Image (spheres, helix red, strand yellow):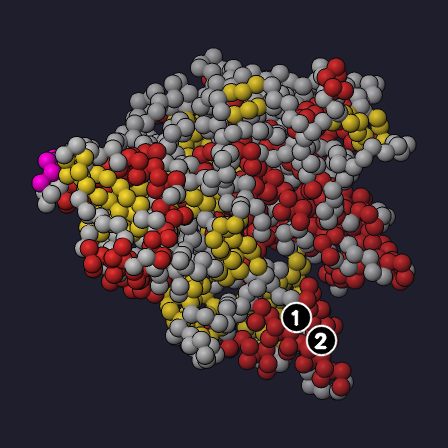
Amino acid sequence: MIHYLLGKRQIVVGICAMMKKSKSKPMTQILERLCKFDYIDVVIFPEEVILEEPVEKWPLCDCLISFHSKGFPLDKAVEYTKLRNPLLINDLNMQYFIQDRREVYRILQEEGIDLPRYAVLNRDPDNPEECNLVEGEDHVEVNGEGFPKPFVEKPVCAEDHNVYIYYPTSAGGGSQRLFRKIGSRSSVYSPESSVRKTGSYIYEEFMPTDGTDVKVYTVGPDYAHAEARKSPALDGKVERDSEGKEIRYPVMLTAMEKLVARKVCLAFKQTVCGFDLLRANGHSFVCDVNGFSFVKNSMKYYDDCAKVLGNMVMRELAPQLHIPWSIPMEAEDIPIVPTTSGTMMELRCVIAIIRHGDRTPKQKMKMEVRHPLFFELFEKYGGYKSGKLKLKKPKQLQEVLDIARLLLDELGQHNDCEIEEKKSKLEQLKTVLEMYGHFSGINRKVQLTYLRNGQPKASSEEEDGPSLLLVLKWGGELTPAGRVQAEELGRAFRCMYPGGQGDYAGFPGCGLLRLHSTYRHDLKIYASDEGRVQMTAAAFAKGLLALEGELTPILVQMVKSANMNGLLDSDSDSLTDCQQKVKARLHEIMQKDQEFTMQDYEKLAPTGSPSLVNSMKIIENPVKTCDKVYTLIQSLTSQIRKRLEDPKSADLQLYHSETLELMLQRWSKLERDFRMKNGRYDISKIPDIYDCIKYDSQHNASLGLEDTLELFRLSCALADIIIPQEYGISKAEKLDIAQAYCVPLMKKIQLDLQRTHEDEAVNKLHPLYSRGVMSPGRHVRTRLYFTSESHVHSLLSMFRYGGLLNEEKDQQWKQAMDYLSAVTELNYMTQIVIMLYEDNNKDPSSEERFHVELHFSPGVKGCEDEENVPLGFGFRPASSENQDKKPNQGSLEDLSQDQPDQALPVSEPINIQRRSPMIRNRKTGSMEVLSETSPTLSSKGCTSHRLFPSCSRQSPEIKPTSVLGSLCSGLFSASALGVSCSAPNLRDYVLPPCSLSSVLICGTIPPAPLYSASSPVLPLPSDEFPVVQLLEGLPAELAVLGFAPLAVDGATAHHLHHCPYHLRLFRTWLMSGQELPESLHGFEGLSMVPSIYPLETLHNSLSLKQVDEFLNTVCESSSEAHAKTMKALSGLFDSQSQTSLYSPQQPLSSSGSETSLRPPSQPLWRESS
């Protein structure tokens, strides 16, 4: 059959596929464009012909586009090609291989294409037990090759999409089960940790991709379109746009990835071919080849695809059929044109060092052991190599528990048997290891240290032979409150990015989530190896990126382990000489049974820190204060014992599943350890006492124990001296100790600031496809470091005492130092934030090109009196020298000026009404915005600051009268606004009004549940207030709009009277028509999640050169510290990549953004050219 059109010979392109595919929208769009070629006709084979007719009766064609999908008779299609011999766009025989993942991997390997390390497990269906699989608790062995968790298990049949990812017990265990998308889900988390026992599978190492998958679509070997989407393994929620389509963003492929696309296309002989890329550790790995697939919803791709296919068909067939045709020539890639941002500075880099969230009290028990079973265990796990052993894995802890049980059984049967271990200690070991009913390395560990001659004995000189010191550590795990703190801070952190305020500044082009979802956000999250720190990092990431579901998948994919030669971890057992001397001096001063003298003040507080001086005034006589503390602890333990004897309290559950028995054990141990046998006090226990009373005051206040406030007050004063001074008493000591802890981290920060412009390894947005994205070339780099108190103290000491600025010459720095001196405690979630801005209008070699800001927050609010809280100067106030210069540094958008809210007079009654439909007042761009979208706080009459004000910044002279003043209008402002929009995905990202962020933000904590919107109207109890005029200016509309009256309890009404910020949030929530967030209905005492202090700016007019020179100086001032740094950094950047928390390390290519060290002498500010 030959087609002619007006006497011209036509080329017939046949489409042979299942109807669902041949009539799909992408196919229709492409075929419509293909038909515009003068000499091309398209014929679609009907499905009933394909399935029921013999191939002899199929339509004729010159060129065949045919591909396999479910139900397609591939054998018949092969038979047809043998009969008619058309030009094949996609080879049909190779499609048999594409259906088998084993064959796909074999072909990829033969072509030299990088793919994850893998092994194939073939099972005989009749004898599934006979296979080379050995399953351990945290690994599998397949054909003798080991795969530690996390690993991936893929069915060998490519049509089977049930891919499982198994997580290690240290991350919480369980598995993520991926499947073909159903509605808005593509995977689900399961607690099941065992691999499947039937079927054949490929096992491969898990590649840490920071939660992003890249899908590549080729049209011939020279064309590839790439899109990034959220990995289905992250939280399983499919991100969809307003039309219900999965959100994907086109990204730029590197030269190496384009070569891989070419190889895949040619190796599988599939012109139109889709495959999956994993970008991990600076490399790209192919993990799946899908065969024929089109990009969805991209007009640019439809144009390109039709053009490439049409030209290909014409090039091959026009000469044979004597059709006149010449190949059109056109450029393929248009270079990215960077956008200028006027006189405004562009945010380039955010670096934050954050302490972990609220945790249970850390506890420790030491015992000397000599039983042969302990020595056997020590030898089994290689303890003799270093003389120390750390046991965290469930299997190891089970072995310790088995030994303890065995010895206790023997002691129970024979009182005179030769077991030297103390019964009470063995019982405690057994009790702690049996807690929770299961093991998790996150909350318990056992350390064994070899003692050649046993522990030194005071009484006799005899040597007892070798022994092992067993140290059991437990507790210290992140609480539910800690998780909420981290998640909420993550949400609030979004507002640091341009466009993140209020209603995303009225258009969808910017804001962190927009930046991140368009893959222009280079984010890496690091955590030390402690479980509470890792879980804080995962919860923070969940809030920051609006993820859903369990923390385990987020932890494994998003959080990198920085346990690389001390970057974020510190060996607390090996103190430096300086630290030991400092502790000895502290011990000596605190053992004097007399009131502090002027000499003591000089000895203990040489820096004159007001927080230290105040604490010393409270204590007066350290020994007398310790006596009081000891008496109060005795009183507390006796009260708990009485409660235990009371039958009503027998099954009383305390916070986080603790029992009264466990609480008593905690306090009894402190009572025993605090006062030593010689009558003196062990001051090293003061931080533990403070830790416990702080925890119980916050979480177990409902017990109503007497004198807890006094115990809290005194132990807090003692701790305010002991904890900060353990990191050095004089400035020189503070610097010396700080260097021992954090030089590797400071060197890494220096590298982060240097490498802001080298973005080869970042997902770059393709400018031709990215409509609606205002600046496809722009990237922001974010580096988040989660660590413990020691690193935060040390880093702050470096900034304070390392000579960054001269207090006498710089007024802003002096004010910042005064503020830091008044801060008593670096509490949970303390943050140190460094922000780097670029002024594109300045000469690249100018010092004014890059601008650095330093911010700080002391973290969670304590139980202290709000009136005594030290005051900072808000977030990003104007510096005096910049005040008369250009407005609006650091913002990309011109935001409308906010007016502070006014609190209602207390005398007015409040009456809340509510309606369900959302009121939409105005549209800006494609986003619809609620009225009342500028949350600013006027507390106690203070002037509020904006995060990115559109007029000149507030002068430091305007001092807020409350620390809350700068709070909600600063860092935390927009995280709690409800926004409706048609921009992709933004609605999911913005927290519903009055959700927990509002509880976290404000000082007054209302009881939970705060208010119920969904319940019917009931008569008001006496302690509830009717509420009116909350929605100012709208009373006339309310009846018409169908509002129903609502009531809140007295405490909440009082709170709303005094807190204009929450008043605004509450009003917005009422208008939004949303359900009350579940998180407010009480969740393990969540109503007592303390709020977090706002970020305070320490300095906002530093140049990058200043900061770089300072970092060079402090990092290299100690040769020992410098050697330690180089060791750490060589581990991080030379031959090995930054590794995921659980992934095997991979070598990094030299094009990676953090792979090589720049000589420190090279100036940083010349790099943007």
* Quarter of image, res 822: top right
Placement of 132 over or under 782, stated as above or below: below
The magenta segment is: 322-327
For label 2, the crowd category at 10 Å Cα-Cα, with few meaning under 14, some 14 to 19 and many 20 or more, is few
Residue type marked 2: Lys
Question: Is residue 685 found left or right of 582 in the rendered image?
Answer: right
Residue behind mark 1: 367
Front position in the image: 47 or 985: 47
Q: Earlier in the sequence, mark 2 or mark 1?
A: 1
- Secondary structure category for the residue under label 2: loop
| Residue 529 visible in this rendered orientation of the protein | no
Give 785 or 437, whichever is nearer the viewer.
437
Q: Residue tagged by mark 2?
A: 422
Instruction: Please state if 73 lies on the left or on the right of 671 as rendered.
Output: left
Q: Counting other residues with Cα less than 10 Å from the Cα at mark 1, is it few (<14), some (14-19), or many (20 or more)? A: some
Where on the picture, by quarter, is residue 312? top left
Q: CA distance from mark 2 to mark 1?
A: 8 Å
